[in-house]
Amino acid sequence: MDDLKKLIRDVPDFPKKGIIFKDITPLLQNPTGLRTAVEIISNNYKDRVVDVVVGAEARGFILAPAVAFNLGAGFVPVRKPGRLPYEKISMSYALEYGTDTLEMHKDAVRKNQNVLMIDDLLATGGTMAACCKMVESLGGNVIGCAFLIELTFLNGRKNLNKYDIFSLIRY
């Protein structure tokens, strides 16, 4: 994991003063780093039945389809308001630096489907908790929440304690 960690860039004071943003762009630009990250996440769930992989906008979109492809599953996007064209459900949640709302098509997950949730970063857990609630409101079974990066000092796991959590890189 140290090789992958070296591919994460710190950007101070983004998106606001006092936040150190973990930029995954260098990892994504590195073919070996990207392949390794996707394969490790995928391999963690290869022995599970995964029907769909949910990825949260925006950086969850980058990893989730590749993991879905590796697992032979479908991909479901969770978007910011106003970006999905069909009937949708929504959920508001707290961020480490404000609030936000996410939406999902109301037919994106069917009852009893096994759903793997993916995002690039686990901070406070608010984004993923909102995504999980939407999936469960549609009748889906959340079988795990996977992250490229976990900021352990923010204790985001406590907001996701009923789920199996997997994170590749921890700070």
Image: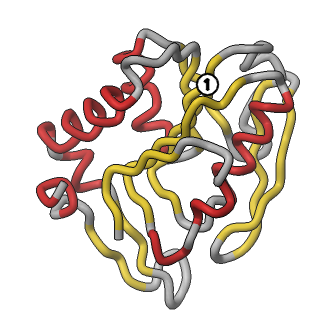
Residue displayed at 79% across by 41% down: 133
Horizontal side of residue 58 vs 134, given as left or right: left
Horizontal side of residue 137 vs 123, given as left or right: right
Residue displayed at 78% across by 53% down: 101
| Rendered position, 155 above or below 81 | below
Q: x, y percentage for residue 2?
A: 15, 60
Query: Which residue is under mark 1?
Result: 115
Horizontal side of residue 32 vs 167, given as left or right: left
Q: x, y percentage for residue 28?
A: 26, 45
Circle 1: is it few (<14), some (14-19), or many (20+) Cα within 10 Å?
many
Residue displayed at 70% across by 25% down: 141
Callout 1: SS: strand
The quadrant where residue 100 appears: bottom right
Q: Quadrant of the C terminus?
A: bottom left
The quadrant where residue 63 appears: top left
What count of labels does the image hold?
A: 1
Q: How is the image coloured?
A: secondary structure
| Rendered position, 45 above or below 110 | below
Residue displayed at 45% across by 85% down: 13
Horizontal side of residue 109 vs 143, given as left or right: right
| Rendered position, 124 above or below 46 | below
- Residue type at mark 1? Val
Q: x, y percentage for residue 95?
A: 68, 68
Q: x, y percentage for residue 85?
A: 78, 25
Q: Residue furthest bottom?
A: 18
Q: Quadrant of the N terminus?
A: bottom left
The quadrant where residue 113 appears: top right
